Image (cartoon, rainbow, N blue to C red):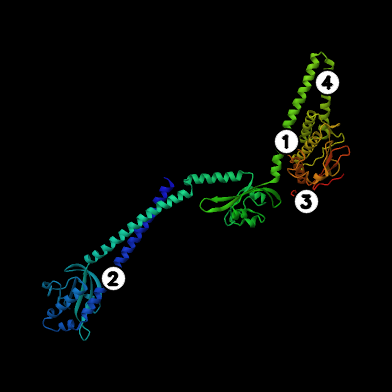
Amino acid sequence: MKLQTKLILVICSLLFLVIVSLGSIFYYIMTSALEDQIGTRALKVAETVASMPDIRHAFQTADPPRIIQPIAESVREKIDAEYIVVGNREGIRYSHPLPERIGHEMVGGDNGPVLEGHSIISKAVGSLGPSLRGKAPVLDDRGAVIGIVSVGFLTKDIATITTAYQSRIELISLIVLVVGLIGSVLIARNVRSSIHGLEPKEIGELYTEKQAILQTIREGIIAINRDGIITMANRYALQLLELPATAKITGRHIEDVIPNTRLYEVVRTGEAEFDHEMLIGDHDVIVNRVPIVSKKHGVTGAVSSFRSKSDLYRLAEELSQVKRFAEALRAQTHEFSNKLYVISGLIQLESYQEAVDLISKESDLHQNWVQFIMQEIPDPMIGGLLIGKFNHAQELKLKFELDHESSFADIPPAIDRNLLVTIIGNLVDNAMEAVLAGGEPASPQVKLFLTDLGDDLIIECEDRGVGISDDVGGFVFTKGFSTKAGEHRGIGLALVQHAVHKLNGYITYHRNPAGGTIFTVAIPKHPNPSVRSHIDDPGPPTTSH
């Protein structure tokens, strides 16, 4: 059964039950009140008639009915009672609406309390049928009971009055029920519209899916309402806020949780903000803020998604590594293809000795390079990177030299190898680009020196390129800044600086006396964990000329 139909049935059933219950209670109260009113009216009339001097004196005459009957009928007609019967202590009637019944005994059997001097209201079956009657004693001058006055209204006449009221109650109840039916249809349609025509099962499934999606997204997500109260926060947001996974921040104001947020400003202005940098605790994050807009009610809240810059840099570095590996494979394939062509030509020319010498030379060069790296730089990630750069340099007709004094074996396990690959790879790429940017230098060379002696890891990359001019020296580590033409520039050195600061090290550069630039990176083997680098504003790098 659809939700709309179910709502209509539930609302109408409840409304019907309430209307019937209230109508029955009201009918009962009204009937009881009417009977009490008529009974009290009958009693008052009976007491009034019983206290009339003419009625009392008539009991002393020889023919009481002659005096009492006209008085009783006159009063009965005025109050529209069914009957007024006056009788003596023996219950013999002195008045009756039907004159032929005068002189006969009163019926009903309820005269006992009246003969004792009490006025009563009773229901009994009289000579005219069931009736509601009020009875009062007639007293003489000494207070003795000498007669009885009975004023009655037939039950069927009372039922006629209550039936008229009952019809009105039923009519009103029917009108209310019809109005309620119309209202229930409108409510059901409004509810259906508010939930976009979805059924409860579909809503439950969407909620479950939403929770699963929010918890699997590797971005912090926080939503607030128009008052700035947090309505939702996923697990990654709690992680960036350095809160337990079981912490509950919903219901709190956003500025109590993140004091420097601009999310509440987005609610007030209704303008989205994208790719803004901010500091949340100890995390530098990239934030997007988007208002939640309702067609009818305007801005009803806002959603913020944020991710650590470290994650973004790591992603960029992974993409950069893939690119470097692809370029290394391409360079190696190209280089070896050329060598194979030369060897093939020498064999065809029957220059077998020259072919053997070339193979031996290339084999010895490659083996010596690989053996040196395996011995002095045993880390497979760094070693693989250097071999790839060596092959790439050969394709570019550059000389890539690893200083023979290099040693990079004593790397503490706590130092992230991915960050070291980022630093070395980007420095070498930047150096090669700087050499190529200088046209065709006499000595197109890139030299790398690695050492693990002492308390620091030292990385020194030297190129014979165009160098860095004084007017741009303070911007070389700025993301997006580059002296080279083309798109997607100005990222390498920014990644290097970020990785260096993550490792609590520092980076400097100075001019190479032979031309070009020398970059030097120092990374402590055992950094102080309490010292945190300020990545957003590290200050300009030191330079020497």
Of callouts 3 and 4, which one flags the residue occurring earlier in the amino acid sequence? 4
Q: Distance of mark 1 from mark 2, alpha carbons?
A: 99 Å
Q: Is residue 272 above or below residue 84?
A: above
From the viewer's perspective, is 301 left or right of 366? Answer: left
What residue would you read off at disc 2? 36
Relative side of 471 to 119, left or right:
right
Q: Circle 3: is it few (<14), some (14-19), or many (20+) Cα within 10 Å?
A: few
* Amino acid tagged 4: Leu
What residue is disc 3 on?
Answer: 531
Q: Of label 2 and label 4, which has the lower sequence position? A: 2
* Mark 4, residue position: 358
First in residue order: circle 1 vs circle 2: 2
Residue 232 in view of the camera: no
Q: Vertical placement of 241 versus 26: above or below?
A: above
- Res. 216 in view: yes
Q: Secondary structure at mark 3?
A: loop
